[in-house]
Amino acid sequence: MAISGIGPIGALSFFTAVEEPSRFPRNEDIGPFLGMVPYFKQSGPIVRRRGISRMGNKMTRQHLVNAASIHMRHAPDDGAIRVWGENLRARLPAAKVRMAVARKLAVVMLAMWKSGSEYSPAGYA
């Protein structure tokens, strides 16, 4: 709950969706687990990139997207995730930016949980 935008319900939802953080060898694996990565449809040489896969826990994904929206508005101006999101906003639609920031927050939350460290706004990008 130290991350701007993550409240008690979002933190509890993430905790119950992940259950055991050691089953993710890399922190980046949480994105596909929660269905926050692009879905590809392939047929022969044709590759179509669709929206997100939506394969994971829908409620946790919604909580993280809401947290990303709040984080982009209320996080410190020099926070690494917010600056990264602002740079994305210049070239991507708002919905894609929210999902990207939500995935980044999920990765940071899992990294904090596994290492037991505190959140530092300037330390993650």
Image (cartoon, helix red, strand yellow):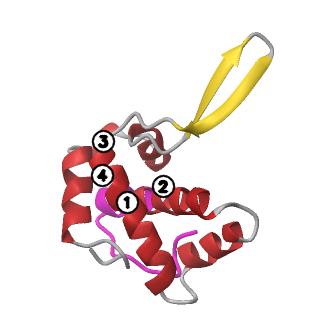
Q: Earlier in the sequence, mark 4 or mark 2?
A: 4
Question: Could you tell me which residue is drawn at 44 percent across and 49 percent down?
Answer: 27
Q: Earlier in the sequence, mark 1 or mark 2?
A: 1
Of 82 and 119, the residue lying toward us? 82
Q: For residue 1, what is the image quadrant? A: bottom left
Q: Which residue has dot 1 on it?
A: 64
Q: Which residue has dot 4 on it?
A: 60
- Report if the CB atoms under discs 1 and 2 are less than 8 Å apart: yes
| CA separation in Å, label 3 and label 1 | 11 Å
| CA separation in Å, label 4 and label 2 | 11 Å
- Report if the CB atoms under discs 3 and 4 are less than 8 Å apart: yes
**Residue 95 vertical position relative to residue 22 in the rendered view, above or below:** below
The x and y percentages for residue 108 are: 43, 62
- In the picture as drawn, the residue positioned furthest to the right comes out as 45
Question: Which of label 2 and label 3 is nearer to you?
Answer: 3
Q: Earlier in the sequence, mark 2 or mark 3?
A: 3
**Residue 98 vertical position relative to residue 53 in the rendered view, above or below:** below
Q: Amino acid at mark 2?
A: Arg
Question: Could you tell me which residue is drawn at 66 percent across and 61 percent down?
Answer: 93
Q: For residue 11, what is the image quadrant? A: bottom left
Q: Earlier in the sequence, mark 3 or mark 1?
A: 3
Highlighted magenta segment, given as a residue range: 107-125
**Residue 57, disc:** 3
The x and y percentages for residue 78 are: 58, 88
Of 19 and 69, the residue lying toward us? 69
